[in-house]
Structures are given as structure tokens and as C-alpha cells.
Image (cartoon, grey):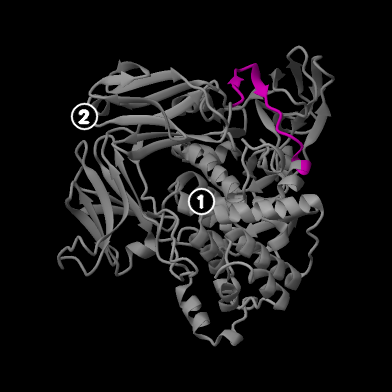
Amino acid sequence: MTSRILTRAGARRCAAGALTLSLGATLLVAGGQTAMAAEPSHAVSTAAASATATTDAVSVSVDADGTVRYRMTEALFRSAQRVMLRVGGGYAGETYKGVAYYSRVSIADGVATVTATRKAAFGQRVEVQRVAGRPGGGYNASTASTVASTVMYGAAPTLQVVGGRTLKVTMPRALFESAHKVRVTVDGGYVGSTVKGVSYYMGHRRQGDTVALQRTLKYAPDETLEMTVDGTVIAHVDLAGPGPQLTVEKASSSLTVIPRGDAEADRKRENRWFRHSVLEPAGRYVTAGQKITVTPAEGASGLKVAIGQYGPHTGINGGASKALSYVSVPGDRPLTITAPIDGLVSLVNTSAAATRVSVSGGVAVPSFVLGETTEAQFKSDLAAFPESPLTVVEGRRLVAAFQRRFLVPRLAGVTVGRVQSWDDAVARIDRTYGLSVSETGLNRKSLARVFMANPDTGAGGASATQDHVTFQVNGGVANQVLTQAIDNQWGLWHEIGHTYQTPQYRWSGMTEVTVNIASHSVLEGFGVSGPPSHQPEVDEFMALPEEQRDFNTAKKIQLRMFEQLFDQYGIGFYAKLSRLYRERVDAGTLKVSGTVAMQQYFMVTAGEASGHNLTAFFSKWGLKPDAETKAALAKYPN
């Protein structure tokens, strides 16, 4: 495991009333529209899939033994930009025009990983900087720009909430016994701390080179658990509620089936494009003709059994794609089912109360559940349960069903940190669209999750449709999900973003544009910054006389307009905008159709969300507000 911190760029702001053209790293991922199972779907094209690796984001990590690795795109590595590594304030290497100095480099999937010869000592700060000039040309700290940093504290500390209430913390013993102050908080509120070998409000136990700490914790869903060292965040967990407490054994499994709502009704209320999933994987796999027995706890009701998976899978159902099969469970009575098809066994709870269920029959599915399963346990289960061709990796907000043949070669990518980062990304997108699992009423995010399928084939490099996103084995983007740096998952964020798109400003041509509001927000949430995308095209567009600028035909610059609203007003802008749209859809007062009407309504509502007259801004971007829109915006200050 590695200790890893990303620089936090924060929301980029400019002077009141002015919108700057200087933005952080973004990508315009474009793809074609396809159809899946007679429902709309969106795909990242093969070209777009490769583009996910072209952001100039840089990350740095330090292994427990002090080995330093920093990662960047291959394009940046081969560029004339001097990228310097500094350890403890001193020079430790750099890259320039495809050469790594005092380091070794490996390149895969468009990402260059540079491993430094020099190691970091305990407590040393490790920084990656953009530096002017060329190697041997000196160093000027005043002009150097730090793009990623961390501090060497040994093995990465971890935070977990087990069983819904127990906080478990592990940290290097050297850090625990040092003079560095370690502090744990929930949404900024103090939980406990350590300094000089003493723990406060947490019990601790030394275990060789590590220390385990624990305390009972009360929290509300959607709160954030963070660990800081001397004020710097080094670990965090988004608390999205208790997990399924899944137990998988050779002959049977047991789990708590959480009520996740009505997927379609919640999609409409939340004013999102695609449904999320209410499936609760049960740790079993069956083949057609096999029997399984489902035994609910006393008093249970509203349960359904689902068998199947999305898309064609090698060795399953003869390689054919078959629709999921559903069977209702009669109250709390045991039910034995003969499987009509091959597939994963999942449960759906349509009642209002969580209930415990056991499932016997079929074969055990190796399952990694965030907060419940360790990486070592998952590896052991893969060996102990070899019969299932599918595996499950499950967070609180995202669940993935990977083919065993795909996952095993990439097993190193199944980590607590990676799965947590998926949950963090979904939570960030919730926040971007003004949704929260802690809310009540219209802006409540249901507990339905993003479901990631991993079939043999699919549309484009990856795609999104009702109930799931698809990252197929032959698509290329799937490989990035388990191997690429957790702050460089644009393809994943993009497809999740499709499920959240607001229909009323997804006018003609915007499907592959407004989707990346989510990706931009997640990137900013990870603290990754870099040069703006498509700057030459933006410069060329802005050089035209204003009356000649046409937003609708200038395809490559369109995302930048939406990003600038985010960068000027912060994540709260789109949250408020989404709430305004949601309220008016619910009230039946938002009835616009057609590109022109949708654009005019968007401009007026954006003015309301920002509290500013955005007439000049939209005119500069070639959107052409009409007289009625200008009048509506005129009531706000410039």
C-alpha cells in the first residue's frame, strides 16, 4: 500500500462579475449514440477512450520503504515541459523530452510511471513541480509550480467503518510514536487523535510495525471521515451508510438486503437521465437448471430474486446476452427456485425496512465489500471459490460485476483506496447535482447505486444506459478502471456522469458535452489541476467578432463554457441549478422543448442560480440570449 496525497486546487475563482478563460485540466470526451435493449445508451468512442489518458494530471506516491513514484501522461513526459521531483526540499530527479533523470520509467496505456532512485525518509515532504527551462538550467523556487505532493509517513494509514458503527484505523507505528499530530474528524468534528505514542478517544493496539485504533462512532450518511497529519489530509472515507454485511461460504451466503427505492420513480424525481441499480449481489452464481433456496428473516416482505448479468459473457448462457430474470419471494417464507438462466444471484428489497436473508445453492462468488472485506481476504476467496466465472467488487455507491478472467490479472487494482475513490466520485457527482442521501424530499438521493457491468463486448469503449454502465473486456477503458491512477479515471466518471445528466439542458449536441460537468467536478474534487483543454480553439473562437460566434457550431469549445460557470461559482452553482430544474419539473411548470427554447431557459436559470446578469458571458460564448432572456437576466447585478 502507498501513502498518497494529491494537491488540492480548490475551486478556481476570479473577480466578481468577470469570467476568466483560464481553466483547470479538462477533456472533451466524445462518443456516438447507440441503442441497447431498445433503450437509449451512450458510448465513449475508441478515440475518446484513449483520450482519457491525455490529461496532464500528475500524481505522486511513496511506498512504505520510501520508494517514490510519480505519474503523468506520456504526452507530458515526452514534452519540453520540465517536471521536477524534490524530496525534503532537495533535487531528486526530473523528466524532460522523454528522458527521466536519476529515475527509471515505465509507460503503459498512455501513462508514464517514473520511479526515483532516491528514497524519501520518514517525515520528508515529496513534491512534483513544473519548472521553467531545461535540465541543468538551475532552479527558481519562486517560479516553480507544485502539481502534486505528499509526505513520507510509511505505509498508508487506513480508515474503515465496520458494521455501520465501529471505526477502525491503522497507521505506521513510526507515525503513531512520532511528534506529528494525527487527527481524525467526521465532517470537521473531532473524533480522536494521536501524538507521541498516545491515543486520545480511541483504543489502540501495537501490531509489529503498525498500530490499530478503534472506537464506536455515530455518524449520518453523507458525512466525511478524514485523517490529517499536522493539518494535511492523508486519508478520507465518504460515509454512505452501512453495507450489506455479506458473508459468503462454500454452500451458502447471508446478507442484509437494503431497501434501495424504486429505481424509475427515483430517477424521475431526481431529474436524472438513467436509472441506478437496486440490485444487492447475494454472493451466489447459478447455472440454468440449478436450484437455489432463499430464506428471509421472520417478518420480511417485498423481496425479489434476480438472476443474470448485463451483456454477453464468455461461458455464460452460451455467450448470449439475456435479460435478467426476476421472481418474487412470498413474504418471509423460504423459496426454492430453479434457475432459468446462468447468472449472478441478486436480491431486491421493495419494502421500507432492511432484512437479513440467506441464500443456498449454486456456487460461491468471490466478493470484495468495502468496509467488510480486506484485500487479503478477497485474494483468498478467489482461490477458495474457483467455480464462479464472475466476481463482485462492491462499494456503498457503486457495485461492479467483473469477469474472473478479466479481474485476476488486475487483482492488484482491487484495493480499499480504489473502491473508496469510486464511491467518492459518485458522492461528488451527487453533490454537483444538488442531491444527498441525507436529504429528505425532492433532493434526496436514493440508495440505488451505479452498477458496472463487464461483458465481453459493448458499445464504443464504454457506455451508459438504464440500470448500469458497461466497461466491456474488449473496450480498453475497462482496463483503466483497475490499473490507472485513481485520480485519472475520466472514462469512469464520464459514464457515471451520463446517468446524472439533466434532460432539460441536454439539448441537441449536448449529450457528450454536459456529461463532463460531472467529470470536471470530480477532477476538481481530487485536487488535480493542469492546462485548459482546447485552448487554441477557444482562442480562435474568442478572436472572432462577437456577432460571428456561434456556440452551436463550435463543437470543441462548448464544454469550456459549462466549466467556466463551475470555476467561477463553484460546485454550488450546478447544485442550485439542478435543484431549480428539479423543483420546476416536479411542480409541472418546466415545459420547454427544442434547442432554442432550452438554451434560453438555461441562460435565465443560470442567472438565477449565480445571482448575476450573465448576458455578456453567454453572448461572448455565442449563445445569443433573446430580448426576453436579456430582460429576465437584467434584474441581477453584472
Residue linked to disc 1: 522
Give the x, y percent position of residue 538.
50, 76
Please state the horizontal and vertical placement of residue 362, each as a whole percent of the image.
Answer: 69, 23
**Quadrant of the image for the N terminus?**
top left
Whether residue 331 sits left or right of residue 170 in the image: it is right
The label on residue 179 is 2
Please tell me which residue is depicted at 56% across the width and 50% down the height of the picture: 492
Q: Position of residue 521 (x, y in %)?
A: 52, 54
Q: Nearer the viewer, residue 259 or 218?
A: 218
Q: Indicate the secondary structure of the residue bearing disc 2.
A: loop
Could you tell me the amino acid type at mark 2?
Ala
- Does any portion of residue 20 appear in the rendered image? yes
- Chain-order first, disc 2 or disc 1: 2
Q: Residue at x 23, y 44 (%)?
A: 125
Q: Residue at x 32, y 38 (%)?
A: 231
Q: Where's the C terminus, which quadrant?
A: bottom right
Corner quadrant of residue 335: top right
Splitting the image into 4 quarters, where does residue 343 fall? top right
In the figure, is residue 7 to the left or right of 612? left
Q: Is residue 51 above or below residue 628?
A: above
Q: Residues within 10 Å of mark 1 (few under 14, many from 20)?
A: many
Task: Tell me the element at label 1.
Answer: helix
Q: What's drawn in magenta, residue-wise? A: 243-265
**Residue 22 sits above or below residue 395 on the image:** below
Q: CA distance from mark 2 to mark 1?
A: 34 Å
The quarter of the picture where residue 288 lies is top right
Q: Examine the structure image and report whether residue 259 is included in the region drawn in magenta.
A: yes
